[in-house]
Image: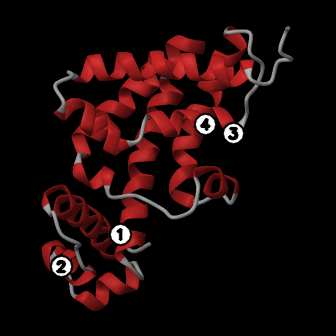
């Protein structure tokens, strides 16, 4: 990609994130273009819709999470804890822009279709979740472990916990503990029940 093309793309993503951070009403691609100081036509050359700009933004944040996960030397629950805490920090850093991403399609459906913006996040979490379930003696829960993580670490709910008075550390600690319990409970549902 040419440097000016790449620069315009970065500016559009950054402008969208700023606008969604602070806007209580829907944002248009024309508004994003104006704040990025590019023409609306240029914005449409890069992104066919506001949703696509948000997907690019979410992929960018997911890449930060994936890169953080790859640098970790810890394993199992310790690594999952570190990666999950980093996600909470990223959500707080990017705030309202992170909470804008909602789809009418389920997480597993989008994940299994390799929806682009979910891929880096899934790559960041797949190995820590596998290591954790092995460490807990649960076996590999596959995509369902990712689904549980996604259900608990929704940006809207993280922001809600912080607004309700929890510190970042408290919210992360509770969410990681809830995830551990959810993984154990999910796995237990597959075990034959004793009478």
- Which comes sooner in the sequence, label 4 or label 1? 1
Q: Residue at x 23, y 40 (%)?
A: 93
Rendered image coloring scheme? secondary structure
Few, some or many residues within 10 Å of mark 2 (<14, 14–19, 20+):
some
Q: Marks 4 and 2, how far apart in space?
A: 35 Å
Query: Measured from the top left, where is residue 19 in percent x and y?
Result: 17, 64
Residue that mark 2 sits on:
31
Q: Is residue 74 visible?
A: no
Q: Secondary structure at mark 4?
A: helix
- Which comes sooner in the sequence, label 4 or label 2? 2
Q: Marks 3 and 2, how far apart in space?
A: 37 Å
Few, some or many residues within 10 Å of mark 1 (<14, 14–19, 20+):
few
Residue that mark 4 sits on:
146
**For this rendering, which residue is in front, 111 or 53?**
111
Residue that mark 3 sits on:
143
- Placement of 79 over or under 46, stated as above or below: above
Say if mark 4 contacts mark 3, CB within 8 Å. Answer: yes
- Placement of 11 over or under 112, stated as above or below: below
Badge nearest the viewer, 3 or 2:
3
**For this rendering, which residue is in front, 160 or 97?**
160
Q: Residue at x 41, y 41 (%)?
A: 154
Query: Measured from the top left, where is residue 170 in percent x and y?
Result: 28, 17
- Which comes sooner in the sequence, label 2 or label 1? 1
Q: Marks 3 and 1, how far apart in space?
A: 33 Å
Say if mark 2 contacts mark 1, CB within 8 Å. Answer: no
Residue that mark 1 sits on:
6
Q: Marks 2 and 1, how far apart in space?
A: 19 Å
- Placement of 47 over or under 60, stated as above or below: below
């Amino acid at each position: 990609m040419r440097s000016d093309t790449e620069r315009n793309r970065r500016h559009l993503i950054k402008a969208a994130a700023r606008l969604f951070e602070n806007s209580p009403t829907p944002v248009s691609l024309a508004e994003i273009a104006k704040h990025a100081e590019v023409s609306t036509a240029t914005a449409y050359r890069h992104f066919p819709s506001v949703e696509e700009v948000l997907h690019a933004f979410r992929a960018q944040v997911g890449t930060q999470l994936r890169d953080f996960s790859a640098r970790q030397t810890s394993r199992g629950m310790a690594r999952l804890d570190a990666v999950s805490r980093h996600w909470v920090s990223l959500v707080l850093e990017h705030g309202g822009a992170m909470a804008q991403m909602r789809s009418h399609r389920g997480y597993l459906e989008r994940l299994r279709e390799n929806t682009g913006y979910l891929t880096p996040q899934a790559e960041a979490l797949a190995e820590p979740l596998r290591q954790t379930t092995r460490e807990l003696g649960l076996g590999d829960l596959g995509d369902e472990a990712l689904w549980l993580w996604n259900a608990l670490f929704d940006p809207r709910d993280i922001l809600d916990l912080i607004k309700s008075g929890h510190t970042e550390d408290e919210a992360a600690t509770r969410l990681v503990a809830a995830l551990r319990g959810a993984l154990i409970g999910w796995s237990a549902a597959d075990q034959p029940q004793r009478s």
